[in-house]
Image: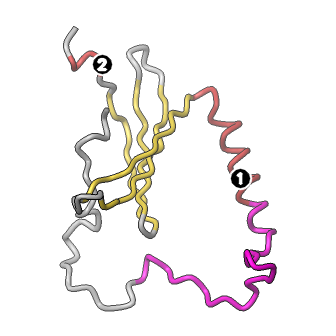
């Protein structure tokens, strides 16, 4: 068998930039023409020798689990919305400044609009 026989056809891909992390949602097809989703979290790190690398965590989600996964995720997100952040020293963070949106830069960007906002992301090992 060649290496290509182990590769799965990518049907859809979406990258979501969220602060220092990037999440990749990739829909792939199996040999039996069924579909599954991989969710990859990628975060740039600096090694002890000073070289940059990407730390990645991947979840494989199969079609038969989509509904239960979605329900559990929605329930967890809704629950987080009901919680008040607490200070580890016993107080609360009621008067915290709002988080900065990563969608709106605080300074004008010198990057042309045609440039990819994902230029610092390494895609080399996503199919592995």
Residue at mark 2: 6
Q: Residues within 10 Å of mark 1 (few under 14, many from 20)?
A: few
Q: Quadrant of the C terminus?
A: top left
Measuring 43% from the left and 14% from the top, which residue is drawn there? Answer: 32
Q: Which is in the foreground here, disc 2 or disc 1?
A: 2
10 up-or-down from 85: above or below: above
User: Would you say the residues marked 2 and 1 are in contact, meaning their CB atoms lie under 8 Å apart?
Assistant: no
Residue at mark 1: 74
**Part of the protein shown in magenta:** 78-104
Q: Quadrant of the N terminus?
A: top left
Q: Horizontal placement of 73 versus 92: left or right?
A: left
Q: Secondary structure at mark 2?
A: helix
Image quadrant in which you'd find residue 21 = bottom left
Tell me where residue 4 appears, x and y as whole percent: 22, 20
Is 122 part of what is drawn in magenta? Answer: no
Q: CA distance from mark 2 to mark 1?
A: 33 Å
110 up-or-down from 62: above or below: below
121 up-or-down from 7: above or below: below
The residue closer to the viewer here, 49 or 57, is 49
Image quadrant in which you'd find residue 43 = bottom left
Q: Earlier in the sequence, mark 2 or mark 1?
A: 2
Q: Residues within 10 Å of mark 2 (few under 14, many from 20)?
A: few
Measuring 42% from the left and 59% from the top, which residue is drawn there? Answer: 16
Q: Secondary structure at mark 1?
A: helix
Measuring 68% from the left and 37% from the top, which residue is drawn there? Answer: 67
Tell me where residue 111 appears, x and y as whole percent: 20, 79
Is 83 part of what is drawn in magenta? Answer: yes
């Amino acid at each position: 068998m060649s290496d290509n026989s182990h590769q799965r056809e990518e049907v859809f891909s979406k990258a979501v930039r969220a602060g220092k992390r990037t999440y990749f949602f990739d829909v792939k097809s199996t040999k039996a023409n069924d579909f599954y989703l991989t969710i990859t979290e990628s975060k740039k790190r600096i090694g002890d020798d000073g070289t940059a690398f990407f730390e990645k965590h991947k979840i494989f989600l199969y079609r038969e689990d989509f509904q239960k996964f979605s329900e559990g995720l929605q329930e967890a997100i809704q629950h987080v919305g009901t919680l008040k952040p607490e200070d580890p020293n016993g107080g609360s963070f009621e008067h915290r400044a709002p988080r900065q949106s990563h969608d709106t830069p605080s300074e004008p960007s010198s990057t042309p609009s045609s440039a990819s906002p994902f230029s610092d992301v390494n895609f080399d090992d996503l199919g592995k």
